Image (tube, helix red, strand yellow):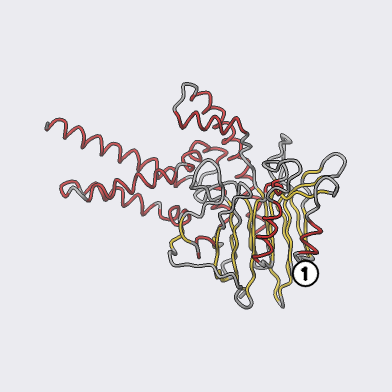
């Protein structure tokens, strides 16, 4: 019995030690370029699980007075990893979101609209989710709209155009569209777009390199908005996607179920993740460079396709404030597939701008949830 107790204690200590090492490596993911350290980026994806395990060990040791010294190791690891924990979860349990904007505030809505659901779940002869999505957008009364995977039709007989509706019916007279992808005959276009109720006095478009020609990313665009006597530069972008298809989601199920073909499934998933990590990291450096050059207070929002403890997020964020972390509560999931902990859509504001409120809306219309934030100019 004594031998079994010793073995159990040693096993717990060894497991605790391994969890701490993996947790700290996952935290280091924020500082290491995935081009060299892609395997550490993989650990970053399971950061929530590692955080849960290390926290669990810390609490476990507290119940055993003779072993409480081991709790210190977990506590020290959690203290070292606090910058990652802080951006993973927002701690404002009593925060609320007021539908009415505060005076002199700027409301921003960002949303990956997945082509307005025109090709995924919409059935022929039906309207799909597009009318509901447009109704939600109208209800928010945002000053600026930033959309990723925006789809525009130039053939109203097949699919309704979106730009004229948003400009005329929702009253956003100014817009800037990246037009990253176009059908051969020009009938359909897609990309990132920014709509504004304030005048756009200048704009910027940067297309990321796509050496393999894969359709997996959209440009970085920016617009200088004249807001009263002030000017603010607003960026939006859609960084490199993992390019998961139905087979890849099936492979994830194989991995979860520990199927016999787990090795082959894992190789396929890791290959795509590694590719995406590398390209996103390089794109993040481009974004950061443009943000740092801005002559005006800058805000960036969009679909980064990466988690808060990633190199991508920390590189772009810099000293900027994450609107959800500043005013939200919980994990703030914005992507509906794979894991309930994926927050990959952000609004990051210049530190000189006050963040008044922020909310993620869990809507069923796209595979992403919209994020809305109110900012106040200095």
Residue visible at 83% across and 45% down in the picture: 158
Q: Secondary structure at mark 1?
A: loop
Q: Residue 116's spot in the image, x, y percent?
A: 71, 49
Viewport quadrant of the N terminus:
top left
Residue toward you, 92 or 314: 92
Q: Work out whether 176 lies above or below 101.
A: above
Q: Is residue 184 left or right of residue 235?
A: right
Q: Residue 301's spot in the image, x, y percent?
A: 63, 57
Residue toward you, 44 or 169: 169
Viewport quadrant of the C terminus:
bottom right
Q: Residue 309's spot in the image, x, y percent?
A: 49, 49
Q: Is residue 337 left or right of residue 15?
A: right
**Farthest front residue in view:** 125
**Farthest right residue in view:** 185
Q: Work out whether 137 lies above or below 71.
A: below
**Farthest top residue in view:** 260
| Circle 1 crowding by C-alpha within 10 Å: few under 14, some 14–19, many from 20 | some
Residue visible at 74% across and 51% down in the picture: 206
Residue toward you, 180 or 352: 180
Q: Work out whether 268 lies above or below 234.
A: above
Residue visible at 46% across and 40% down in the picture: 43
**Image quadrant assignment for residue 184:** top right
The tally of labels here is: 1
Q: Residue 365's spot in the image, x, y percent?
A: 63, 50
**Image quadrant assignment for residue 50:** top left
- Residue of label 1: 199
Residue toward you, 32 or 141: 141
Q: Work out whether 376 lies above or below 212.
A: below
């Amino acid at each position: 019995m004594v031998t079994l107790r010793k073995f159990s204690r040693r096993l717990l200590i060894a497991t605790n030690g391994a969890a701490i090492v993996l947790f700290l490596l996952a935290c280091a993911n924020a500082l290491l370029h995935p081009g060299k350290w892609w395997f550490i980026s993989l650990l970053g994806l399971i950061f929530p699980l590692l955080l849960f395990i290390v926290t669990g060990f810390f609490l476990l040791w507290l119940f055993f007075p003779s072993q409480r010294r081991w709790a210190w190791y977990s506590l020290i690891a959690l203290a070292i990893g606090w910058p990652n924990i802080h951006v993973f979860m927002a701690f404002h349990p009593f925060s609320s979101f007021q539908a009415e904007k505060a005076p002199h505030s700027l409301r921003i809505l960002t949303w990956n609209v997945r082509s307005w659901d025109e090709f995924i779940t919409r059935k022929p002869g039906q309207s799909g989710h597009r009318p509901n999505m447009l109704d939600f957008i109208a209800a928010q009364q945002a000053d600026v709209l930033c959309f990723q995977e925006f789809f525009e039709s130039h053939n109203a007989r097949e699919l309704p155009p979106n730009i004229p509706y948003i400009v005329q019916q929702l009253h956003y007279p100014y817009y800037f569209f990246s037009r990253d992808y176009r059908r051969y005959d020009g009938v359909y276009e897609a990309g990132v777009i920014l709509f504004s109720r304030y005048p756009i006095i200048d704009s910027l478009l940067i297309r990321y390199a796509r050496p393999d020609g894969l359709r997996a990313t959209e440009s970085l665009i920016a617009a200088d908005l004249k807001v009263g006597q002030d000017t603010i530069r607003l960026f939006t972008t859609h960084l490199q996607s993992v390019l998961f298809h139905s087979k890849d989601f099936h492979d994830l199920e194989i991995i979860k179920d520990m199927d016999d073909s787990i090795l082959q499934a894992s190789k396929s998933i890791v290959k795509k993740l590694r590719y995406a990590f590398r390209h996103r990291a390089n794109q993040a450096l481009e974004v950061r460079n443009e943000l740092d050059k801005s002559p005006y207070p800058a805000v960036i929002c969009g679909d980064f396709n990466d988690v808060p403890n990633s190199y991508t997020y920390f590189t772009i964020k810099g000293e900027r404030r994450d609107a959800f972390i500043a005013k939200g509560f919980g994990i703030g999931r914005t992507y509906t597939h794979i894991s309930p902990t994926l927050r990959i859509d952000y609004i990051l504001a210049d530190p000189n701008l006050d963040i008044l409120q922020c909310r993620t809306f869990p809507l069923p219309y796209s595979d992403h949830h919209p994020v809305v934030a109110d900012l106040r100019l200095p």
